[in-house]
Image (cartoon, coloured by chain):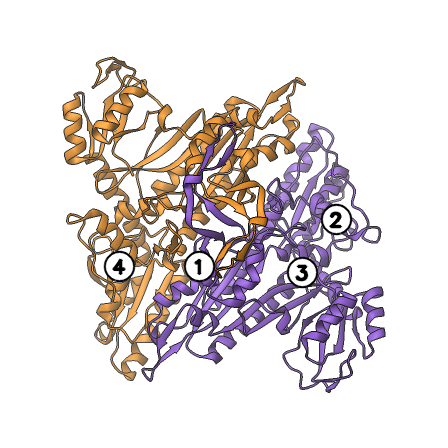
Chain colours: A purple, B orange
Amino acid sequence: MADAVTPRDDDYAQWYQDVVRNGQLAENSPARGCMIIKPNGMALWENMRDQLDQMFKDTGHENFYFPLFIPERFLEREAEHVEGFAKECAVVTHSRLKTDEEGDLIPDPESELGENYIVRPTSETLIWDTYSKWIQSYRDLPLLYNQWANVVRWEMRTRLFLRTAEFLWQEGHTAHATKDAAVDEAERMLDVYETFAEEYMAMPVRKGRKSERERFPGAVNTYCIEALMQDGKALQAGTSHFLGQNFAKAFDCTFTDENNEETHVWATSWGVSTRLIGALIMTHSDDQGLVLPPKLAPHQVVIVPIYFDDEQEGDVLPVCEHMQEELEDRGIRVKMDDDQTESPGWRFTEHELRGVPVRLALGPRDLGNDVVEVARRDTQEKETVPQDGVVDHVEDLLDDVQQNLYDQAQERQETYTHVVDDYDAFKEVINEEGGFVWAHWDGTEETEARIQEETSATIRLIPFDRDEDDPGEDMVTGEPSEGRVLFAQAY
Amino acid sequence: MADAVTPRDDDYAQWYQDVVRNGQLAENSPARGCMIIKPNGMALWENMRDQLDQMFKDTGHENFYFPLFIPERFLEREAEHVEGFAKECAVVTHSRLKTDEEGDLIPDPESELGENYIVRPTSETLIWDTYSKWIQSYRDLPLLYNQWANVVRWEMRTRLFLRTAEFLWQEGHTAHATKDAAVDEAERMLDVYETFAEEYMAMPVRKGRKSERERFPGAVNTYCIEALMQDGKALQAGTSHFLGQNFAKAFDCTFTDENNEETHVWATSWGVSTRLIGALIMTHSDDQGLVLPPKLAPHQVVIVPIYFDDEQEGDVLPVCEHMQEELEDRGIRVKMDDDQTESPGWRFTEHELRGVPVRLALGPRDLGNDVVEVARRDTQEKETVPQDGVVDHVEDLLDDVQQNLYDQAQERQETYTHVVDDYDAFKEVINEEGGFVWAHWDGTEETEARIQEETSATIRLIPFDRDEDDPGEDMVTGEPSEGRVLFAQAY
C-alpha cells in the first residue's frame, strides 16, 4: 500500500513529493539531479508528446534529430548564449575509462579529447551551424523543424519534473526570410502552447513577453505562457523565442533574397518540457493524491470487479469485461484491475493516488440491481448508474471532469490575481496570499532587481497588448510606467 | 537537384552514402561520429518506433525512462560489462565551463566532479540498481519495461546509421522469478523482432544464438536476428539477451519466493536501434536511390499534378486533391507535390531518390482520357489506370510492393546461402561471392578467432534447433562438431 499524502496546508513541498511518489510518476536516481520517470509518468508524458506532436505537424512542422554533443567552440559563437549556459553544463573530456594501479576506474589520460563536448543544454548552436549549410536561397525558406530530445542543465537543487539536471523536451527551430515571418511563427507556437495547456492540461495560462532580464540567452524577445499553481506561485509553462538574426550572424547563415541580395536569416525557437508534468500536478492534484485531466490520463477509466468466490467471479467478471470492450470501442483508455491479491478498498485508493479520472466498481449486489458504481476522481463523488447506460454516462462524465478541472483552476487564477498600485500593498499580497499581481513598473532592470531582492517576486510577463492599460507610475520609484506588468513569485 | 547515385557495382560504400544523402535521411555532424537525422530519416524512424512500440505493448510491456548519466562505480559492478564498454564511452568530468586568461573556454577546474559520469552505452547497471529497490517479493515480478533513448558508444570509424557514436534505440529490461520465465521472455522478444523485420521491413532474417565470443558483455546467452545485405555481408539487426542472474548478483537484487526463500532475480534485455535504417537501405535500395517498404515509408504515395497554365491548373488540381482525400480516407500516407518551381521530371526523380513506393502523375492529357499514370518505385514499372478505380488499385499495389520487396530479398538470401565442408571452399565463397555460409565448427574460441583472422568471417549465429543437423567435423581442425553454424563477413 502506498504511503499517505501529506496535506497541502501542512507542508506543500512534501505534499508535492508525496503526490509524485504515490502517483508512481517518478523518483530520484543515483545520477545526481537526474530523475527516473516511472511507467505511469512516462505514459502521461507520451500522451502529452503525441498531442503536441500532432499540433506541430498540423502547423507544418517536421521532426529531425541533432546530436547530443555540442563542440565547445560552438557555444562560444553567440556571446549571450555562452554566458547563459556555460555555468551549468556537463562537459565530456575523455572517451575511455581505464583501471589504474589501485584497481580503480579512471578516465584514460590518453583518451583526453582534443576538443571537449558539452551535453546539449539546448541545440541552437549546432542547428544554426547546419542551417548555414542547408540554406542558400529564399526558396529554401522557411525551415520548420522540431526535435524531441533529452537535454542537460547542471542543477544543484533539483525537484522532480520542476527542476532536474536532465529533462525531456521538444525544441522547435525555424528559419525565415523576413522578420515578420519569424515573429509570426514565434507567436503562432505560443498560441499552440496556450491551446495545449488550456484544452488538454485544463490549465489556464497568461500569455505575454518576458522582460530583458528574463529572456532566453541569445533571444531578441521571449514569449511565454505562465500558469498559477495552488500555492500561489507562478510556473513558466512554455516559451517561444524570436531570435532575430543573432544566431544567423553568429553562424554566418545568409540567403539570397528575391532581389538577389544576401541577407541574414531570421530565427525562432520554442520549447516545452517534462516540467509541464510538475505544472499539471500542482494545478489539479489534491490531498488524496494525483488528479489528471481525462484527455491526458494514461488510463481514463479503471474498472474494479468485486467478488469473493468463483461463482460470483463467473457473474461479475463477464459484465466488467463487456463494459471494458464497449468503452474501448469508443476510444476510451481503460484499465481492468482484477488483482485479487488486493482488497477492493486498496485498489480504489491505488487508482485514486494515480489520478485515474473515473472509477467503475461492480460487485454481486450491483449485478442484481443492474447497476454500476461510478466515482469521479476530481470531486470524489460517487453515484449508482444503470448498467445499460453506463458507457454514454462515462463518456459524458469524462468531458465533465475535464471541464470542471479547467473551471476550478480558472476560478482560482481569477481569485488570486490582484491589481495593486502601492509597493507596501504589493509586498503584503506577495508575502501573505501569493498569486499574480498586476502592478506598474518603470521598465528598468534596476527596479526589477530590487523588487526581486526584496520580495522574491519577478516579472512573469509584459502583456502583448498594452493599449487598454492606462499608463501609470512605478509602484517603487514613482517613475512613469507604460502599463502594468504581471508579477509573481515563481518556480 | 540531388546528385547522382553511384552504381552499387562501381563502389558499394559510395553507393550507400549517396542513397542516404539523396534520400534526405541523414548527414554527418560537427560532433565527431554523431549524425544529424534529417526529417525524412526521422519520419521513417518514427514509423518504425511506433510499430515496435505497439508490439511491445501488445506483449505486456510499458515504457519508462532512466537517466542519461551512469555513475562510474556502477559500471564496475559487473566485470564483463565494464570490460565490454569502458573502452568506448564518453566521460563527463566537469559541470561548468569558464573563460581562461587567454579568453578560451575551458572546463572550470573547480567544477570537477567527485565522481565521473559516463554517458550511457546501455542502461543495465543503473536499471538493476533500481530494480533491487523495486523488487522485494515474487508478487512484484515480472517487471516488463522498455525505454526509447539515445546511447553513446565512442567509435572512431563511423558510417551513417550503421555505426555512429550516438544512436537512437530501445532497450527492454525485464525481471523474472524463474530462469524459464526469463528465457521465454528473451525468445518472445526475438520473435517480435523477427516479425517486425519480416512483415514491416520486408527483410528476411535468420534467428539463433551467438557464440560466447560474440555475446553481449554480461549476458549468459545472446539471441539475434541476422539479415543479408546486397553486398553479401551480414548485419545483426536485433539482439535479445538472457542475462541469467549476473546483474541481479552484481546489484544485490533478490526477492522472496513463494516458499519464503530469498533468491536472485532473473533478467533479460533486448534492443534494436537506428542501425535498422542502415539494414533497410542495404536490403532494398537500388542504383536509382532509396527504396522503402510501404508499411514504413513516411509517404506511401506521392501525387504530382502537371499543368502549364492557370486553366490547366483549374482542371488538374481538383482531381489530384480528390484522389489525395480518397487515399487518405483509407489511411494511406500521401504527399501532394505541387511545387511549380520544379519540373515534373525533377519532382519524379526527387521522390524516386526518397524511396516513395508509389507515384501518381496527372496532366491535362490524362484528364481528357480519365486516367492517371501510376509508377511503382520497386520495379520502376509505369501503367495507365482509369481514374475511378485508382484508389483500389493503389491500395492493392502497396501490398504488392511490400510483398515483392520481401520476395526479392528472400530470393537473394537463398541464392547467397551456401553449405560448405571444406575450409578452402569456405575461403573462396567468403572472398568471392560473400553471403551466408553454413559450416561445421568445433565449438572452440581458438578456431573461431583463426577463421576471423584469415577470412574476416565471424559466426553470425548458432541455430536454436540443431537436431536436424548431422554432427560433423570442423572444417579447419577436423575436430568433432555438434552441427553447422552460420558464418559471414558482417557489418
**Residue at image coords 51%, 45%:** B92
Callouts 2 and 1 on one subunit:
yes
The residue mark sitting in front, 3 or 2, is: 2
The residue mark sitting in front, 2 or 1, is: 1
The residue mark sitting in front, 1 or 4, is: 1
The residue mark sitting in front, 1 or 3, is: 1
How far is disc 2 from disc 1 in space, using C-alphas? Answer: 47 Å
Q: Secondary structure at mark 2?
A: loop
**Mark seen at residue A73:** 1
Q: Please, is residue B258 above or below residue B207 in the view?
A: above
Give the labeled residue for mark 4: B353
Q: Secondary structure at mark 3?
A: helix
How far is disc 1 from disc 4 in space, using C-alphas? Answer: 35 Å
Q: Secondary structure at mark 1?
A: helix
Which of the two labelled residues, at mark 3 and mark 2, occupies the earlier sequence position? 2
Give the labeled residue for mark 3: A399
Q: Please, is residue B367 above or below residue B332 in the view?
A: below
Q: Can see residue B373?
A: no
Q: Chain of mark 4?
A: B
Which of the two labelled residues, at mark 1 and mark 3, occupies the earlier sequence position? 1
Question: Disc 1 residue type?
Answer: Arg
Q: Residue A437, percent across and down?
A: 77, 72
Residue B443 is left or right of residue A447, and the answer is: left
Callouts 3 and 4 on one subunit:
no
Q: Chain of mark 3?
A: A
The residue mark sitting in front, 3 or 4, is: 4
